[in-house]
Each structure stands twice: as C-alpha cells, then as structure tokens.
Image: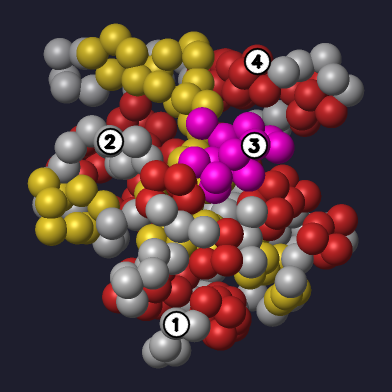
Amino acid sequence: MVEKLVCLDMDRVLVDHLSTWQFVYDQLGISNDESFELYNQGKLDEWDWIKLDLALIKSSFDYPITDGHLRSLMEGMPMMKGWEMLIEHLLSQGVNVAIVSGGLQQTARDIAACFPSNRPWRRRWGGIDRHTAREQAGGMDSMLHVFTNGWLASTPLESGDSLINEYGRYQVQMDGKGSVVKMLQRRLNVSKEHTASVGDSSGDIGMFKESSCAILFNPWDDRPKKHAHFVIEEKDLGLVLDRICESLSIPKP
C-alpha cells in the first residue's frame, strides 16, 4: 500500500475564524496589534512574539491564569463546514493526516481527539497531550499528527491544574511549514507525489512546495496563488476533499 499524506492548516481552514489566537483575544477584549507590528518591523523574533502575547493574555486577569482556564477560553471555536467529513474520510482510506499550524495548540488537540486510534495514549512526536487524551479521547491516542504553537503549563497546583509558563510552545515557525512536511514525509515514508496540503495564506507556501496537490482554500491574500495547484474560495471543505481524492487517487465518499 502506498503511503499518502494530507497536511492541513487550521486557522481559516479547519476553523472558521481569523485565527485561534484572535478568538482568545476577542474573548478577553484585548488586542495584540502592538506586538504584531513589532514583529512585522523585524524588532521581534517569533519566540519573543509568543512570549509577549502570552504576557498580554496573563495581564488581562487580576489573578494567575491556569492551564485549565486557558483551555476553557478555546471552547465554542467556530468550525469550517465539512471539517469532520474531510478528516474522517481521509482516515478511513488509510491516509496520514496532519494539522500544521501556527494556531493555538488546544484547538488542534481538540480536533485530533475527535479521531482516537485503537492505541492507548503515549507521548510521541506530533501527538496530543495526556489531559486531552484522557478527557476527550477515552485515554486513547489520536490518529492525527499535530504541530502547532501555544502555551506551556508550569507550576502544578493542589487543585490538579497548573500555572502557565512565561515561555510558549513553538513548533511551527512562520515560514517553517515546509520543514514540518518534509519531516513527516521522511518519518511516514511518503513521497511528494503522494502529499497534499491545504492552506489559506503565504505562511502555507512552504507546505505547497512540498506537495503534488497544493490547495489554497478561503484565501487570505493573492500571494500564494502562484504556488497552488487549486484555489477554492467557497468555504466548504467538501470541495477540498473532492480535489484531494482526484489528485491522490483516493475513492470519493
């Protein structure tokens, strides 16, 4: 059997919102415009950008924020039409599916937990965390591979919760998605010919370059169009699934 791989961006692709980070800012009534502008001016690297954004989130509370509280802020995330069908069908056909996103880790883990494997949870490269596996996947591992950014829990509390570290969890650089795809291809023994990727912005060009089927979905801007094989502007992931199936010779639903 030929191994196949589909890599999915999350914000504006699986999630029907500008970004998962922005969803939290909206919940708290805050803005990261200042740090975003500093990053665009080259005055911040990406590690410091996440650190500043986490400090901004913490500063909106009069008390120390916990891992559990941050998780709760992710609830109610609006999802894109067809997201579940897309992933479910690909997995049913034996396709490797990965979320590769600069978005917040918890939403990606929540998505991944909807597709538990038949293996008990274990810590692994690209896996979900123990808490999400226990609470949402019956203690099982996920069938998906997950690479995202976000926060790190630090000091454990008597309640069983944890405080948040000042440093973030940083797996996906702004221009580093191509490297993640290449690592997945090596580990899963998948060729570029049998790889598809779906993204919405210039940050996904690296993924597109490592894929034989690159789909620009719900485009944020026009810059990635010349790197995409297909452009789908309608917010319906069923259309994306059709293109992937045709390109990678996968039976359609």
The answer to whether residue 63 of the structure is visible from this angle is no
- The mark tally for this picture is 4
The answer to whether residue 205 of the structure is visible from this angle is yes
Give the label, 2 or 1, closer to the camera: 1
* Residue 177 falls inside the magenta stretch: yes
The residue identified by callout 3 is: 176
Q: In front here: 9 or 150?
A: 9
Residue 5: percent from the left, percent from the top?
Answer: 46, 61
The alpha-carbon separation of the residues under discs 2 and 1 comes to 28 Å
The residue identified by callout 4 is: 48
The residue identified by callout 2 is: 124
Give the label, 4 or 1, closer to the camera: 1
The residue identified by callout 1 is: 250
Residue drawn at x 49%, y 41% is: 183
* Residue 22 falls inside the magenta stretch: no
Closer to the chain start, of discs 2 and 1, is 2
Residue drawn at x 56%, y 85% is: 246
Closer to the chain start, of discs 4 and 2, is 4
The part of the chain drawn in magenta is: 171-183
Name the kind of residue labelled 2 in the image: Arg
The alpha-carbon separation of the residues under discs 4 and 2 comes to 26 Å
Quadrant containing the N terminus in the rendered view: bottom left
Secondary structure at numbered mark 2: loop
Q: In this view, does 178 lie to the left or right of 76?
A: right
Closer to the chain start, of discs 4 and 1, is 4
Q: In this view, does 175 lie above or below 89?
A: above
Give the label, 3 or 1, closer to the camera: 1
Closer to the chain start, of discs 3 and 1, is 3
Name the kind of residue labelled 3 in the image: Gly
Closer to the chain start, of discs 2 and 3, is 2
